[in-house]
Image (cartoon, rainbow, N blue to C red):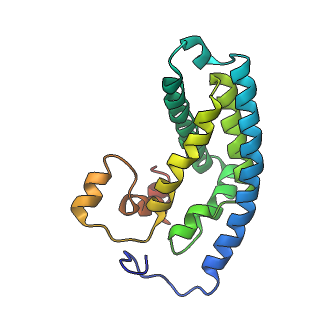
Amino acid sequence: EAIASRRMMPAQPGRRRGNLLISILSFVLGGITGTALLALATWTSERQWGLLALLHAPVWLCWLLGVLLLDLTDYWRHRISHATGWLWRLHRVHHTDLAMDVTTSFRNHPLEMVLRAVFLAATTLAFGIPPMALLLQPILMLPVLVFQHANIRLHPALDSTLAWLIVTPGMHVVHHSRVPAEADSN
């Protein structure tokens, strides 16, 4: 971001520090809820609970489907957060950062992190998400999340090619627009 910024950052003393402080609380809650989710996934797996258990598929396929189902759950939770007043009040903590950069990735209302776990718990129970999928999903998601919020300039050809696979910073900045129709477009 310091070498190839896409946007000029407004002078906001302490902004990054504030983002990182709120991130610490979110990470602590994420660790607690993540541990609880992992225990839930272990419990469902031991009891062959959920729709994935009915597939009798190879373990690697259950991991892959689990990661995809967790990601889809996060996607719909995010959509619902934009469409529901009280959830939006929590989610807008992430969107009110005036200068989007990597620290924005982690700027989330702590209560939203708890509600995220509730959504993921429902998916874990319904589908019997394996514990390994719960471990893999954040490992795969985190680099993309940080990348898409980064204030970096990509070559236009690289940006448009990557946009077919993942959300790029150039694409995601529109989602952080102050114009509701753009922000709610997902």
Tell which of 92 and 134 is nearer to you: 134
Residue 86, position as x, y percentages in the image: 71, 51
Q: Is residue 7 left or right of residue 76?
A: left
> Which corner quadrant holds the N terminus?
bottom left
Q: Is residue 172 above or below residue 166?
A: below
Q: What residue is shown at x 49% (from left), y 31% (from top)? A: 64
Q: What residue is shown at x 60% (from left), y 34% (from top)? A: 132
Q: What residue is shown at x 72% (from left), y 29% (from top)? A: 42
Determine which quarter of the picture holds residue 69: top right
Tell which of 41 and 80 is nearer to you: 41
Kindly tell me whether residue 178 is visible in this rendering. Answer: yes
Residue 180, position as x, y percentages in the image: 50, 58
The furthest residue to the left: 157
Residue 122, position as x, y percentages in the image: 69, 31
Determine which quarter of the picture holds residue 6: bottom left
Tell which of 58 and 22 is nearer to you: 58
